[in-house]
Image: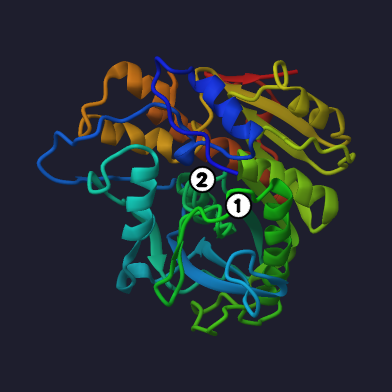
Amino acid sequence: MTTTPFMNQEGTTRRRMLGAALAVGVTVPIGAAGQARAASTAPGPVQLTLPVPTGPYPVGTVPLHLVDTSRPDPVAGPGHHRELMASVWYPARGVDRYPLARWTSPAVMRALLTSAGFPADVAVAPLTAGHESAPVLRTGRRLPVVVFSHGAHDHRADTTIVVQELASHGYVVVTVDHTYDAFSVFPDGRFTGLDRPGLTPRDFATDIRFVLDRVEDLAAGRNPDAEHRPLPAGLLGTLDPQRIGMFGWSKGASATAFVMSEDRRVRAGLSFDGPMQPTVTTDLDRPFMLMTAEFPRATQPSVAEFWSHLRGWRLNVQAEGAVHGSYCDQQFLIPQLAQAVGMSNADLQGWIGTLDPARAVRIQQAYPLAFFDLHLRHHRGHLLDGPCPAFPEVQFIP
């Protein structure tokens, strides 16, 4: 199985290319179509930035190297087991002595840029709001957990705006690289790329269910890291395994549906423009929310079919002008690259649609937080009740 090649705007429309990619089980890297120009017009690499989270707590983060000894590695051969890289994000304290973590490693950044048609050295990964291995803020009760699954041919940092927003409001968020369908770097320096493009949403779901077991390890005070590297002070025993949610983008959104159909540990699920392919035909009685863009129920039978099986609380919202990656970090990062690569306004619109990046950030910060607050914390606001004057772009789809 091969990745559908990138084509320029004269060769295909963005929707047609995404549809072709999904037909063979992949998603366009970084979630967009548009072809960047080959050479940078800037004198040096662009230092990208991310918006700061709005919550009251500082944010900490730590990577985990996880090995599933029950599954063989699909590429490395006999004697090797499935390995995953994950990151844990959490509310922190005493962060001043702990450096800010990069969005991703230099090797992954170069791979992401080149896979999307940009020069490899055009940009430097932004700093996040996460302080590396800072102590966990102890609030006197266990913290709710949210797990994230990325899109095909992607990486675990692609919704960091959402992830650090949740952490700044008191959630523990676990993000996962689906090895061989992601760009990832392991503690020994090994880089893995897109060596197994045939991974399906069900494969992603199997990875996530293994990660849920590791969440239970952390909650029980056990260190699941393969090398047993020290964890941040206060992390062990602070996760609440009875309050777990999950969200995913694209293929990861479909995986979220599969996980919920198989594992009742996940109490609430959120989809960022998931195609829901293959179709999930199991009835779900737990809350599920769709944030659609290029895969709306009106034109996507698989999404409409999935919606028909939601027997519990359900909601479908859609931001006007959004495209497939508009609920991910690229909506904020790609415009920062546009001038450096000489991108035209038409090409930029091909990447991010017509949804203003600053407005997209506010939507990314507000709606997932409101969803998980409602269903994991039982904190009821009014944002999910219907159209809101503060977010005129967000439509409620009946």
Where is residue 127 drawn, in percent x and y?
A: 32, 55
- For the question of whether residue 389 can be seen, the reply is no
Where is residue 135 drawn, in percent x and y?
A: 46, 74
The CA span between labels 1 and 2 is: 10 Å
Of residues 338 and 310, the one drawn nearer to the viewer in this rendering:
338
Query: Which quadrant of the structure image shows residue 300?
Result: top right
Of labels 1 and 2, the one closer to you: 1
Q: Would residue 366 be found to the left or right of residue 376 on screen?
A: left
Q: Is residue 125 above or below residue 317?
A: below
Q: Is residue 369 above or below residue 89?
A: above
- Which of disc 2 and disc 1 is earlier in sequence? 1
Mark 1 packing: few (<14 Cα in 10 Å), some, or many (20+)?
many
Mark 2 packing: few (<14 Cα in 10 Å), some, or many (20+)?
many
Amino acid type at circle 2 is: Val
Q: List the residue tagged with mark 1.
A: 148
Quick one: SS at disc 1?
strand
Quick one: SS at disc 2?
helix
